Amino acid sequence: MSFSIKKQGEVVVVDVEGQLIVGNRQELKQKVLDELEKGEKKFLIDFSQTGYIDSSGLGVLVSLSKKIREQGGELRLANLNDDLQTLFELTKLDTLFQISDTRERALESF
Amino acid sequence: MAESRVAFDLQIPSDVEYIEGVVELARQRCRELKLSPTKCSLNVPVALSEALSNAILRGNESTGGKQVRVRAIISDTDLVFEVVDEGPGFDLDKCTVDCTTEDNLTKEEGRGLFLMRQLMDRVESFRNQGNVVRLTLHRE
């Protein structure tokens, strides 16, 4: 499991490879907060290579979304597979995040 | 009465780094049992991950030396996971929060037990040589 970060235009894109769980959530949080501290405002997390997410992982997404908004920025999500979509619907987090089917659509939406 | 067999019986240290390996083992058993893809890739991984992290972080409070036992039991009808920690136990109903309410939706924590109960057919918590959380999922 790992996180890769790259810049596409004005958007910081984070790929979550593997699981987003209690054991690695702090790593994701710190990477995104480091970018936020550098002045980045637009963030996209792409889940096309993600297995499963636990409640800690979901909690980190909620926390990051709040912190980014407090700095005048925005966090969007892309490429949830059917299982992840179900997870977001069960927890109603699909109502909290702007979620796109593809990375391209998400990038265009900023 | 349906016969059951133990698919695995493990002791792990109170360290969240061990969760992913146990969950992968459980997923393999799910695939061998030909459970639905969603049960293999969503219900079991997330619910078991929650039970293990609760046991490690809350039950054993990540205390070095304390162990978590996890067993998988297969019957004709069900797949059952029992996660046992060395903590005092908890009241499942009192501790389960509806994380979908307006007030709770934006909170960072409080989704673990809710998800376990949404994703399993039955969740029980009781004392038996430790604090046991039992997750039951119907195979069909």
Image: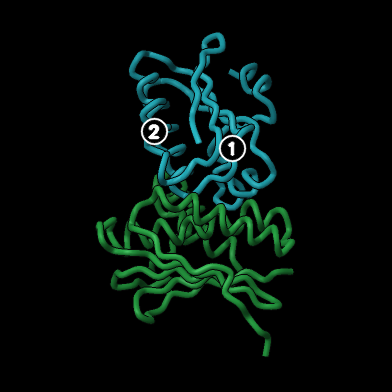
Chain letter, colour green: B
**Residue found at x 29% / y 69%:** B87
Place residue B83 in its image quadrant.
Answer: bottom left
> Which chain does tag 1 point to?
A
Q: Which residue of the protein is positioned furthest toward the top in this rendering?
A: A9
Please give the residue where the numbered disc 2 appears in the rendered image.
A27
As shown in the figure, which amino acid type bears the numbered disc 1? Thr
Would you place residue B52 above or below residue A54 in this image?
below
As shown in the figure, which amino acid type bears the numbered disc 2? Glu
Q: Nearer the viewer, residue A100 or B100?
A: A100
What secondary structure is found at the residue carrying circle 1? strand
How far across and down, in percent of the image, does residue A74 sit?
A: 48, 24
Place residue A73 in its image quadrant.
Answer: top left
Please give the residue where the numbered disc 1 appears in the rendered image.
A50
Label 2 vs 1, first from the N-terminus: 2
Instruction: Give the class, few, some or many, for how many residues have Cα within 10 Å of label 2's Cα (few <14, many ≥20).
Output: few
**Residue found at x 63% / y 73%:** B74
Left or right position of B28 against B55: right
